[in-house]
Image (cartoon, rainbow, N blue to C red):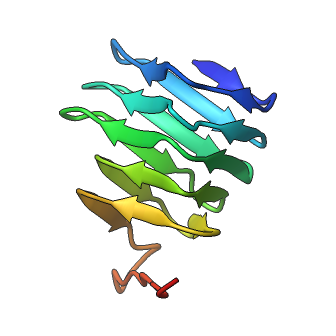
Amino acid sequence: MNSFSAGTANTKTMEASNGGNLELSGSSWNNAGGTITAQTGSTVELANSVTITGGTLTSVGTGQVYVTANEVANLTGLTNSGTLNVQNMGRSMPAARLLTTVLLRCRPRATPHTSTLRARPY
């Protein structure tokens, strides 16, 4: 597992691959011009109020980008071109604009298996 907690800029590609996990936790990332990718069988974990601004989040095959249960990810002005999983009581807080081109999935907390997705125009 690679865990990054110091905010910085990413203008290239950060990825989880070969069954690995990339954790972005409690930091601010300027991802303008960059891509954060979960390759097949790998995960990108967004936790501890991480902030990502700009760029692209993507997943390939069975790869997953997800907001950890009971955590918050602040996503601003980025494109999600894969599946973004928001786990039990996790929250994705788009401060400005989140363009989702594939799928945003909310996982239910518990029985009776309900999830809420709230969207507001900007």
Kindly give the residue lying farthest to the left in the view shown. Answer: 61
Question: Is residue 97 toward the left or the right of residue 48 in the image?
Answer: left
Q: Where residue 23 sits: x, y (%)?
A: 60, 31
Report the number of discs: 0
Question: Is residue 53 toward the left or the right of residue 4 in the image?
Answer: left
Q: Where residue 1 sits: x, y (%)?
A: 57, 18
Question: Who's the residue at 37% across and 30% down the image?
Answer: 38
* Vertical relation: 47 (above or below) 115: above
* Vertical relation: 24 (above or below) 84: above
Give the quadrant of residue 93.
bottom right
Q: Nearer the viewer, residue 108 or 58?
A: 58
Kindly give the residue lying farthest to the front in the view shown. Answer: 33
Kindly give the residue lying farthest to the top in the view shown. Answer: 18
Question: Is residue 35 toward the left or the right of residue 72 in the image?
Answer: left
Question: Who's the residue at 46% across and 48% down the image?
Answer: 66
Question: Who's the residue at 43% across and 75% down the image?
Answer: 110
Q: Nearer the viewer, residue 17 or 31?
A: 31
* Vertical relation: 117 (above or below) 99: below
Q: Nearer the viewer, residue 37 or 99?
A: 99
* Vertical relation: 98 (above or below) 16: below
Question: Who's the residue at 47% across and 87% down the image?
Answer: 121
Q: Where residue 70 sits: x, y (%)?
A: 64, 62
Kindly give the residue lying farthest to the right in the view shown. Answer: 6
